[in-house]
Image: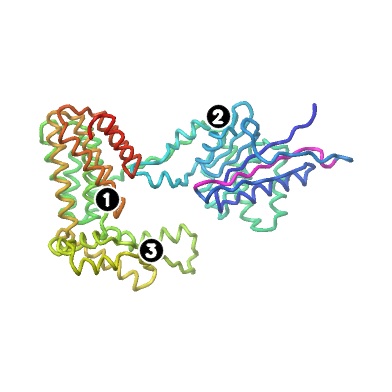
Amino acid sequence: MSPKPIKIAILAMGGEGGGVLADWIVDLGESNGYFAQTTSVPGVAQRTGATIYYVELFPGAGQPGARTPVLALMPMPGDVDVVLASELMEAGRAVQRGLVTPDRTTLLSSTHRVYSIGERTAMGDGRVDSDALIEHARKAAKRFVSFDMAESAERVGSVISAVLFGSLCGTGVLPFSRAQFEATIERGGVGVKPSLKAFAVGHDQARQAEAAAPGATAEEAQFKPVQLAAIADQQVVRLVQQAQAYPDPVAAIAVEGVRRLIDYQDPDYAALYLQRLAALATAPGGQDTELLAESARYLALWMSYEDTIRVADIKTRSSRFNRVRSDVRAKEEQLVDINEFMHPRLEEICETLPAGLGRWLARPHWAHRLVRRYTQEGRVIKTSSLPGFLLLYGLSRWRRFRRVTLRYAQETERIERWWQRVTALAAVNPALALEVAQCQRLVKGYSDTHVRGLRNYETLMQVVDRHARVLAPAVLRELRDAALADEHGHKLRASLQQHALQ
């Protein structure tokens, strides 16, 4: 039987060491009697398209008179022995391309996610279900080994490519010993110690992952329990107790809503949240648990809308500076500069002012034209410097006067109209009331994102007001999904036309 090449595909994003990993595999083969060749096809960018590295190993290089084989330049669907994916979505892409087959391919993948541009910019929750990706990959591969390799690499101060290399060794899919793998890293001569540590972690976890029960589930967010004894403010204690009086799962959401709105504004604002929630709970049909829970969730989200005050507050919190330092892995003695690109529109400036002044500035006159000219270009504010920090910090302190701003007046009016719709529909059609409550998902973000979402939301509310008696909940859900799927509103218009609701 003639020997066959070992075919390996590596899918990695920029900065993850995919090229180093491919070079290690080539060196591993060439140092142990194999012909080896690597090629790469770069993606469009670091996240919009991963680089595919392709390696072929062919035995017999050490034999006298061995002829150099002709090796392929690209992986072919259904003809790959090993696929290494540095991120879960890249494993899904490999499966989609047909590089992973159940009769042949060993698939090694990290379970962490680096969200794509499409996932991040979606109007709704655009994230791909990680559990579905894992299950799909498991069914598509002959062997599937997965764990959070990014966390393993960070824990030992190395890069994910070394963990992948260790995982490749741990599966035993290549005809080389652990000593031969480790000798390859040592020959590289750069970052040998941390790479060997990461290699060892990858090797051991790959073996444990195969031995363990299949399936790596994504982490689910859980509400943090509130310890009343640890709260000094008695008003806050009373608010939490009121929220906890609701049945599960409404209570958990209501408590989180109280926590969020106290952080956003103050306890009085959280009390207003509970008053609105109580109005629905005591209204006819408002006792429906699912309706009450979802309404509590989206009411808290809308009441904590993102205005310029909120953005400035978040950007000047110590937790954000700590997170940025952690993300760039800055050492204690290193300085980190943070440059914020700010491009406030005239409308946002008007909304931050007291309501009367904001309405006056929004009207076309000399002041309006002067401020609009100033806002045509963005500004870079260095929040790591004292002047930049004080500028945004001062804006964030304006939150004590948020209730007098134009934006607060506008959002309060929108929230009240929405809440009245939900309350009124709860008495006659709780299922439709639930869909109306969930339409708040369209209203999010700030600047242009908020404008587009609000426009789609108002379109749906017009449909509800006109056709509430005959509108099926499933139709409103379909319209909402169409609005969330397309920020420009094309799919929503098509769906409205399809249902003759224009």
Q: Residues within 10 Å of mark 3 (few under 14, many from 20)?
A: some
Tell me the amino acid under the disc marked 1.
Val
| Viewport quadrant of the C terminus | top left
Question: Which of the marked residues, 2 or 1, is nearer the chain's N terminus?
Answer: 2
Residue 18 on the magenta segment: no
Q: What amino acid is labelled 3 in the image?
A: Glu
Marks 2 & 3, CB-CB < 8 Å contact: no
Q: Is residue 360 above or below residue 125?
A: below
Residue pictured at 45% horizontal, 46% vertical: 116
Q: Going 31% across and 36% down the picture, which residue do you hit?
A: 481
Residue 73 occupies quadrant: top right
- Looking at marks 3 and 1 on the same chain, the residue that comes earlier in the sequence is marked by 3
- Segment colored magenta: 48-62
- Tell me if residue 49 is in the magenta stretch: yes
Residue 140 numbered mark, or none = 2
The type of residue carrying mark 2 is Ala
Q: Of the residues tagged 2 and 3, which is closer to the observer?
A: 3
Residues at marks 3 and 1 touching, judged by CB atoms closer than 8 Å: no
Reading the image, the residue beneath label 1 is 451
Disc 3 element: strand
Q: SS class of the residue under badge 1?
A: helix
The image position of residue 397, as x and y in percent, is 24, 65
The residue furthest right is 64
SS for dot 2: helix
- Indicate which disc residue 471 carries: none
- Residue at the extreme bottom of the image, as rendered: 387
Please state the horizontal and vertical placement of residue 384, each as a whole percent of the image.
39, 68
Give the number of the mark in front: 2 or 1: 1
In this rendering, position of residue 291 left or right of residue 341:
left
Residue positioned 21% across, 43% down in the render: 458
Question: Is residue 246 toward the left or the right of residue 100 in the image?
Answer: left
Disc on res. 340: 3
